Image: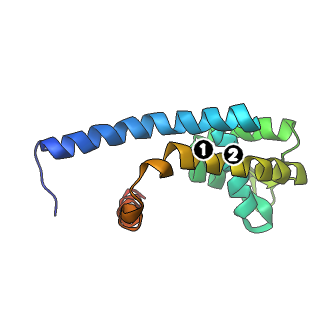
Amino acid sequence: MTVEGPLGAQEEHFWRALMRVVVALPRSLDDDLLRSAGLTLTEYLVLMNLSEAEKQELRMTDIASATALSASRITRVVDALQSRGQVVKRRYEGDARGNVATLTPEGLKRLQAAYPIHLASARKRVMDHLDRRSLSAMARQFEAMGEHLD
């Protein structure tokens, strides 16, 4: 059911709280990872997506889509990871205009070292502040929102 018009007081309160989290959470997760693991949140997400992909490689356009970054921004991130030996970028054989990034053993090692740090940050920044009894319902609601947004 869609209700048009201004938000009610309870809806407005929720909306403002959600917007604060949407803005502040990525910064906090980024700060935690950078300080403790030497990776930005974006770099972590690139390495994570590569680690989960078939042959641990993805087209640059797919990485950009998975991380919600522009093509130029993802190119800079992948180039930085490549300069540190964590990924290798090469031309995509199926399309000379595209590139593929592949996770290296060093990149996997960095991701594995950062993983517990990221989970601890997620727990500290989010999970510890939620009512455990509501998690399943909230997960379903956020999944439904995500599907609607995709």
Estimate the x, y position of residue 95 in percent, counting from the top left: 74, 57
Q: Nearer the viewer, residue 4 or 139?
A: 139
Q: What residue is pinned by disc 2?
A: 117
- Measured in 3D between alpha carbons, the distance from the residue under mark 1 to the one under mark 2, in whole angstroms, is 6 Å
Q: Tell me: 9 left or right of 107.
A: left
Residue at 72% in and 64% down: 53
> Taking 58 as reference, is 114 above or below it?
above
Q: Is residue 56 above or below residue 38?
A: below
Residue 142 figure quarter: bottom left
Residue 57 is tagged as: none
Front-lying residue, 55 or 98 = 55
Give left or right: position of 115 versus 29. right
**Tag 2's secondary structure?**
helix
The percent position of residue 78, horizontal first and vertical second, equals 75, 41
User: In the shown orientation, is residue 104 left or right of residue 122?
Assistant: right
Residues under numbered marks 1 and 2 in contact, where contact means CB atoms less than 8 Å apart: yes
**Residue at 16%, 59% in the rendered image:** 2
Q: From the viewer's perspective, is 129 left or right of 112?
A: left
| Residue found at x 36% / y 59% | 145
Q: Quadrant of the C terminus?
A: bottom left
Q: Nearer the viewer, residue 113 or 4?
A: 113
Q: Which residue is mark 1?
A: 121
Q: Is residue 53 visible?
A: yes
Type of residue at label 2? Ile
Q: Residue at x 85, y 51 (%)?
A: 109
**Crowdedness of circle 2 by 10 Å Cα count: few (<14), some, many (20+)?**
some
